[in-house]
Structure formats: structure tokens, C-alpha cells
Amino acid sequence: MTTPRRRHPQSIADAVSSMPAETQRRLVAENKAKGSRHADKLENPFAEQMRLAGLPTPTREHVFAPPRKFRFDFCWPDKMVAVEIEGGIWTNGAHTRGKHYESDCDKYNLATSMGWRVYRFTEKHVKNGSGLTMVEAALKGTKE
């Protein structure tokens, strides 16, 4: 008796797309936390700032409106506070162009309609600490 031959994916994208959605989300979160350029440059330093400031540990890559795949970079679901780190704003990054920009507008408008307070920070906000100050105030329930 011969065993059926397993089809090998043509690419990593094929392999990932055949995984359950929860596994895909976990892998994306792990990849962002471990080493994508965006995470290394902005998200990971911001996460370290929050840790050093003693803020509650945020949830990363939280899907806030299933079945939509919209995710927050950081959030505190119990406080309905979310943070988006906006990279690539000076390099014509994907999220500053047409389709992605419109999708981001949909995402932020949906989040707001659901009661989320979404803070959007650029590299400037991460580096000068103003993003951290705003998040500290939001989590304490005060205005910055």
C-alpha cells in the first residue's frame, strides 16, 4: 500500500495561508515581536519604554472586531485603549498610500464606533517619549 504523497507548499505564504486563522495570528504576532523591521525600529522600543515605565503589559496584535482581521499593535482590552505605531510615513510606506490608507481609516473608525480610544504614534512620538506620556495618561484615565 502506498501512502499518498503530501503536497509541499510552493512558498511560505502558501504554507501559512493553509494554517488555521488563530495560528496565523500567533505567527504574525511572534514575527512582529521578534524581528520585522517595523517592530525592531518602533514597536519593540515602545514596548520597552512601557515596560520600564511600569505600565501594565499590553496585548499585542489583538484582533478587536472578528471576523474582520483588524489588529492593534498594542492594546489594553479592559481599558478599551489601543496604540498603533505608524511606520513608513516618510518613505511612502504601504499605509500612507491609497488602498491601505483607506483600510486604516475603516479600521480606526470601526474601533472608535466600538468605544476604543486609539492612539496613533509615529517615530517622533516613540523617540521623544510623548507617546508613552499619552498612554500613561490614557491608562490612568486622565488627560495628558
Image: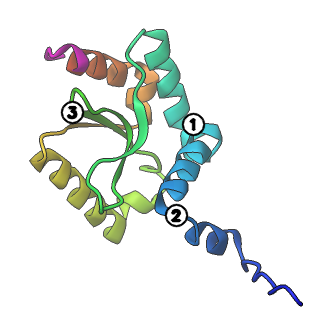
Q: Main secondary structure of the magenta part?
A: loop
Pointer 3 or 1: first along the chain: 1
Question: Circle 2 sits in a helix, a strand or a loop, which is it?
Answer: loop
Label annotation for residue 20: 2
For the rendered model, the colour scheme is: rainbow
Label annotation for residue 80: 3
Query: In this figure, which residue is indicated by the disc labeled 1?
Result: 41
Label annotation for residue 116: none
Across and down, in percent, residue 76 comes to 31, 29
Across and down, in percent, residue 11 comes to 71, 74
Alpha carbon separation for disc pair 2 and 3: 27 Å
Question: Circle 3 sits in a helix, a strand or a loop, which is it?
Answer: loop
Which residue is farthest right?
Answer: 1
* Relative height, residue 40 to residue 5 (above, below): above
Position of residue 80 in the picture relative to residue 59 (left or right):
left
Report the residue at 48% width, 55% height from top: 22
Pointer 2 or 3: first along the chain: 2
Question: Circle 1 sits in a helix, a strand or a loop, which is it?
Answer: helix
20, 45: nearer the viewer: 20
Position of residue 22 in the picture relative to residue 117 (left or right):
right
Q: Quadrant of the image for the N terminus? A: bottom right
Across and down, in percent, residue 144 comes to 19, 16
